[in-house]
Image (cartoon, rainbow, N blue to C red):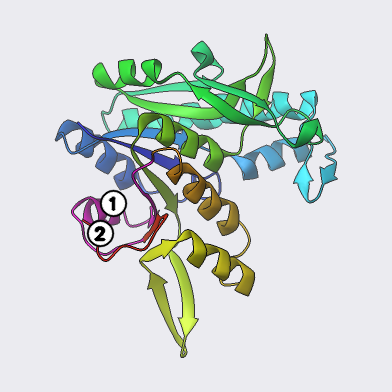
Amino acid sequence: MTKAVFKIGGSILQELPKSFYQLLIDLKEKGICDPVIVHGGGPEINQALKQMNIESTFVDGLRVTTEEVLEVAQMVMSGTINKRIVGLFQGQNGKAIGLSGVDGRLLQAKPIHNGKLGLVGEITKVETAWIDMILKEGGIPVISPIAAGEGESRLNINGDTAAGAVAEALGCKLVLISNIPGVMETINQKEIIHHHLTKNDVEAMIASGVIYGGMIPKVRSALASLKGGVEESVILNGLEPDNILKYLDGEKVGTILREKEIAEHV
């Protein structure tokens, strides 16, 4: 059965309907695909840091992850959020297994930006055997993007980047779950969805301001994953779970990202 990595961002976690989780369970039970979940948790980490009066420093607009910040990130993502998602699957009679990238050294990483951002890393290896074992036993892996560094160290990983690395290692599709129907643009006073975009398209749209804010790292992570064997990446609206089925059936929905121009999605 084919696999698909679903990235759920922290900003949409609270919005997703229970039908989203039920659909992923159905996909597995009906043999359509094996879902693998990678999630984020930025907004809840920010809230926890504020409540604990932990101040953050920033370099070029990016938070420096100190040991103190990492402890909070791990607590929120690998604890609260990860187990909440597992509970949502189990509430729909699904079998989900929650784990972080530290468990079994599932995600292995090295520091990035010469350590200027502190304990922030990039994935160097994914131990896919753990994922395959869970899938084989009928489970849905739910992965928190805290990775194992050298020795006992841990590193915080951008959720989109982690999802791309997992999809790359599995050689499967990457589905980025959003609260919008894809990359949109207003042309002649009409809002349209770009259903197919290439790397050049994306960079041009970033430069022109059509793609901005949190969508920038999302589309760039999607494109970066394509280089390593990901079949294709797609941005879909998780608030309308049927869009996932439509996409898997080959219908024109969401925004598909590929390295080069394609005529039709099949």
State the residue in front, 68 or 159: 159
Residue 54, how many percent across, how many down? Answer: 83, 34
Q: Residue at x 69, y 15 (%)?
A: 153
Which residue is under mark 2?
A: 265
State the residue in front, 161 or 114: 114
Label 2 and label 1: CA atoms lie apart by 14 Å
Q: Residue at x 29, y 46 (%)?
A: 19
Whether residue 52 is visible: no
The reply to whether callout 2 and callout 1 are in contact (CB within 8 Å) is no
Residue 182, how many percent across, how many down? Answer: 42, 63
Magenta span of residues = 230-254
Q: Classify mark 2: residues with Cα within 10 Å, few (<14), some (14-19) or many (20+).
A: few
State the residue in front, 195 or 30: 195
State the residue in front, 247 or 139: 247
Looking at the image, residue 180 sits to the left or right of residue 22; the answer is: right
Mark closer to the observer (2, 1): 2
Looking at the image, residue 47 sits to the left or right of residue 220; the answer is: right
Image quadrant holding the N terminus, namely top left
Looking at the image, residue 79 sits to the left or right of residue 45; the answer is: left
Q: Is mark 1 on a helix, strand or loop?
A: helix
Amino acid on which the number 1 mark rests in the picture: Ile
Which residue is under mark 1?
A: 244
Looking at the image, residue 200 sits to the left or right of residue 95; the answer is: right
Q: Which residue is drawn at 34% across and 32% down?
A: 89
